[in-house]
Image: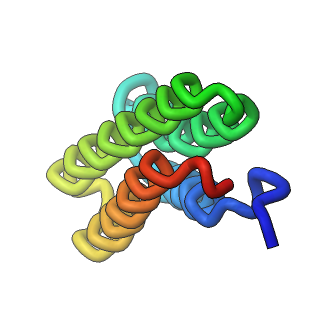
Amino acid sequence: MGIKSIHDLKVYRLAFELAMKVFELSKKFPKEETYSLTDQIRRSSRSVPINIREGFAKRRYENIFIKHLTDSLGSSEETRGWLDFALRCQYITEEEHQETDSGYDEVNAMLYSLMNNWQTL
């Protein structure tokens, strides 16, 4: 049972679901945040699965694949930073923050693992 498509990668599926969760959470942000926090958190959260996907498409080139996974990791951490702002501004609850942040913690662990074991794809 090998990895035949991007949808076979658990890290991609989780990152995509987290981006959708961030989208839903950000719907309740105030209008004055539309072009700042809302836009930033949506972009960074979507960048996580998209970089995994782009890297997967170029996986035969190790350096390019690893670069995209590294970019994905950076976007994950950026999203976590925006989640901290959303919590501090009281746009999301502590529970929403904890659940989403934990999800990104899991994504990061999987990204590190994939970077170190990418040849097994």
Q: Position of residue 49 (x, y in %)?
A: 59, 45
Identify the residue at the far front of this view. Answer: 119
91 or 62, which lies in front? 62
In which quadrant of the rendered view does residue 20 lie? bottom right
Q: Residue at x 67, y 35 (%)?
A: 59
- Say if 65 sits above or below 22 in the image: above
Q: Is residue 31 visible?
A: no
Closest to the observer, 17 or 29:
17
> Which residue: 21% across, 44% down?
85
Q: Residue at x 49, y 33 (%)?
A: 66
Nearer-the-camera pick, 2 or 39: 2
Question: At which x and y percent is residue 120?
Answer: 62, 57
35 sits left or right of 95 in the view = right
Q: At 82% from the left edge and 53% from the top edge, which residue is drawn?
A: 5
Q: Position of residue 71 (x, y in %)?
A: 44, 30
Q: Is residue 13 visible?
A: yes
Where in the figure is residue 9, as x and y percent of width and height?
A: 67, 60
Q: How is the image coloured?
A: rainbow
User: Looking at the image, which is closer to me, 117 or 17?
Assistant: 117
Residue 24 picture quarter:
bottom right
Quadrant of the drawing holding the C terminus: bottom right
Quadrant of the snapshot with the N terminus: bottom right
Residue lying farthest left? 88
User: Along the horizontal axis of the image, is 45 left or right of 33?
Assistant: right
